[in-house]
Image (cartoon, rainbow, N blue to C red):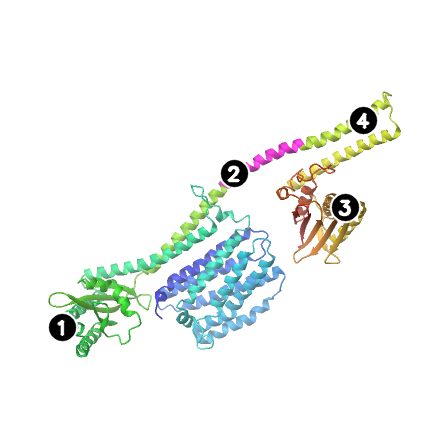
Amino acid sequence: MSGFFNDQYDYIYFFYGLAFFFLAIVCITLQKDKTRILPWPLLAVFGLIHGINEWLEIYEIVSTGEKILPAVRLIILGFSYVVLFEFARTGLKRLGLKKIGWWVYLPFLAGALSGARHGFAGCEATIRYFLGFPAGLLSSWMIYRASRIEYREKKPLLFLSLMWAGYAVTTGVIVPESTFFPASWLNFDSFYRVTGVPVQFVRGIFALFSSMAVWFYSQTVPSIKHTYNVIRFPWRFKPSKWLIMVTFGTLIGLGWVFTNYFDYYMGMHMVENMRKDSPLNDLTRELAKVGRAAYSLSVSPKIAAAITSGQIDDIGKARVLLIQTQEKTGALECTVLNALGKVVVSTETVLFEGTEARYKTRPYFIKSLSGELGYYLTRGSGYYERIYSISYPVKDKPGKVLGVILIKKQIVEHPVIPVRLISIVITLVVCIIAIILFVAWGRKERLIDLVEQANKQLRELDKTKNDFISIVSHDLKSPLVSIRDAATLLLRDNAHTMSLDTREKKDLLETIIHNTDYQVRLVNDLLDVSKIEAGTIELHMELIDILAVAKKIVVSLQSRAEQKKIKLVLSANRESLVILIDEERMRRVMTNLIDNALKFTAETGTVTVRLEDRDHDVLVKVIDTGIGIPPDDVAKLFQKFYRASNVRGRRKDGSGLGLVIAKGLIEAQGGTMGLDSELGKGTTFYFTLSKQK
């Protein structure tokens, strides 16, 4: 194989493994999400193990003669796929789609081990076929199904499902070359020959984008998103998650450039030192020998004649001289170039397309063309192998440069720590420092935001307290005034200062009783709100048929609906909906919602109570065709004593705490409550109750 990627596998495995470590970190933070559907900790374990496996590939590249490592790496690879399989299996179970037993591992493990007789490459191929491919595809399908029932942002999960499917194909179908089909036909080498890109690089891209998708998904979790995203710079600029991802992508890209440049610089520095040192070791003597040979060729009349005349005889003589020099020095190639960079004669029998164009741009050719010695260092086919290129100008008698003589010699270095590995470690340290700085900065700014939010909440609480005192004072004072006035009139009648008939006395007594009852309800509601906010509300949870509860409430309110000529309807998709609830509290919630719907629905309107049995919960809706709620009031409707702007002029029969209490009681039973409304067309109040016991 030839091309740019030939000597880049170490860095490819580096960022490939780094992407999986990033995936593991993000999945660990998702443990904070108490409502999570997917088993993210298992995906975190997979990312951690698989990242270790990819970084072991780097060690396998730089190590020589290591026999145990390939076996260890295969065990780690297989175990990581088993964990991924368990992620898919557990996720499907949580989603209620399919329950796959432990027995499913037996045929897949047997298939994975069937390639052992074909050596390490064959065993890795079958591990990828029978574990990596099915585990990846099953995980992708499971994530897709989860996106369809996720109540938060669905796009990150859909994108993750797509990226994971791509990873499943590249990791489970394109395998190391082996003697059996299809590994003998579709493998790492064939993929590289067709696409010009190593499959490991493609996998790394899929892994990187999968990590991004999980991170974007984590930003939809309220308890997690501020861990990374709240980053405020001194000029109060908050970068988006995209900018942060671009920053880290840029760091990885710059690290790649730095790795190649540092490798080149250190290699050239090594050659420069060798040229200056006295010949104390074999490598220095070899380089000196190549240099002398290049110089000898550059001053040979046969080489100059081949360049100037271009005759077949002169070229043949020059070629014989080049072959003798190649055999003497052990060079890979000896080539004569004219001043335009065109090959005059070479020991290479086959020159690849574009070779001459590349010669024209090489630093050593440009330098020799100016009359000086040129040399260059590139990587060879092995990790420790380098190609040392040295060139001398070929001049005529007056000193004009006719062309360039080029000799390429393979040298082998054995440093204690490979140069490229040092630069990769430096890149890793920079990435870790960047992550620490981002997280530390984010936490600092998060604390600032928390303080600001706390101050804002204190101001809102202070305002709410004042409003609360004002409203409660008014709601308590008004009935007391009515009671006092009625009692005063009764006292006057008793003192014979005025005369009241029996009906008038009865009306005054009813006024006293009505206002006293209102005050009792108000005090009880205030106590309930206090208990709900303090989390001390007492619940008596039992398995109750909530549909039967709804039927009783609808029957009890049917007469009131008929008085207003409103159609009150009950519907359900099941004949019975048994769920764990507090029956008395649930009766209060549903009565409040239906009563409100009847109150704000005009004559001949419709109020529908609908119950739906879903996969994980029960959904209850109260739908009316009433006056609706202004959009600006929807978000405030669950605040204490708040009333929508289009009903404030109406007579208020309740305490103004009904919806606050209803929402608190539903949440205390593990549910959620919300509403949808369109002004002038109607309102839908809904709540969900979990079916988990």
Q: Please, what is the three-letter code of the amino acid marked with disc 2?
A: Glu
Q: Please, what is the three-letter code of the amino acid marked with disc 3?
A: Glu
> What residue is pinned by disc 3?
603
Secondary structure of the residue carrying tag 3 is: loop
Q: Residue at x 77, y 50 (%)?
A: 567
In percent of width and height, residue 612 lies at 70, 56
Query: Could you tell which of marks 3 and 1 lies nearer the N-terminus?
Result: 1
In percent of width and height, residue 132 lies at 50, 67
| Distance from the alpha carbon under mark 4 to that under mark 1 | 135 Å
Between marks 2 and 1 in the image, the one whose residue lies nearer the viewer = 1
| Distance from the alpha carbon under mark 2 to that under mark 1 | 85 Å
Secondary structure of the residue carrying tag 2 is: helix
Q: Dot 3, crowdedness within 10 Å: few (<14), some or many (≥20)?
A: some
Q: Dot 1, crowdedness within 10 Å: few (<14), some or many (≥20)?
A: some
Between marks 4 and 3 in the image, the one whose residue lies nearer the viewer = 3
Q: Please, what is the three-letter code of the amino acid marked with disc 4?
A: Ala
> What residue is pinned by disc 4?
487
Q: Please, what is the three-letter code of the amino acid marked with disc 1?
A: Pro
Magenta segment boundaries in residue numbering = 448-470
> What residue is pinned by disc 2?
452
